[in-house]
Amino acid sequence: MTPVLNKHLPDFEALATSGVKFTPHAFSGQAIVLYFYPKDHTPGCTTEALQFRDKHKEFLKAGSVVFGVSRDNMLSHDKFRQNLELPFELIADTEEKLCHMFGVVKNKIMYGKKVKGIERSTFLIDGAGVLRAEWRGIKVAGHVDEVLKAVKDLKKTA
């Protein structure tokens, strides 16, 4: 079941770096940015993470928390966070529960073979746990600024 815009998210729990247990209720009252990316330590994902890092204070100022999500394990996430000095947590979705919940698992062609991969996507959830915006199949350039603008606009209407 893929979440529908302007509907409450179902309750779920996911483990993130720094021992954080992520649930939408744990961040009630704050906007949540969940960005799904294919793999730690790859060029596009590194660029995207750095852009979220560089704008992190602005996201906080606008009343939101940021979480990155991929299928990588916690050890990989810990190294990725440390190497890039990321100020936000990364969710290890090794069983693809969140990936399937948000409908970001797609068939891709890689080196002529069909593989399952993560479609780079971002979701904005408001302080009441309602999905307010989604970006799917995004290009990294300019994306973080677009998400930040949506967060700021959401704060104005709250």
Image (cartoon, rainbow, N blue to C red):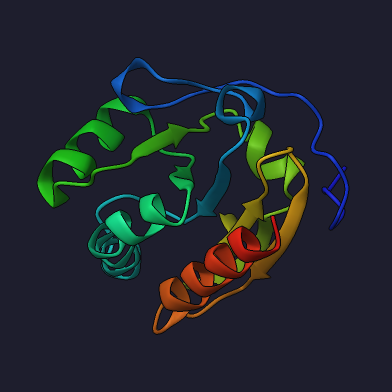
Residue 125 seen: yes
Tell me the quadrant of the picture where the N terminus can be found.
top right
Residue 88 at x, y percent in the picture: 32, 41
Query: 86 or 107, which lies in front?
Result: 86
Q: Is residue 89 above or below residue 6?
A: above
Left/right placement of residue 114 relative to residue 61 reads right
Left/right placement of residue 67 relative to residue 82 reads right
Q: What's the residue at 73%, 38% (across, down)? A: 129
Q: Is residue 154 above or below residue 74?
A: below
Q: In the rendered image, which quarter is residue 48 located in?
A: bottom left
Residue 43 at x, y percent in the picture: 26, 68
Tell me the quadrant of the picture where the C terminus can be found.
bottom right
Q: What's the residue at 68%, 60% (across, down)? A: 106
Q: Is residue 61 above or below residue 95?
A: below
Residue 99 at x, y percent in the picture: 65, 43
Residue 115 seen: no
Q: What's the residue at 79%, 38% (across, down)? A: 9
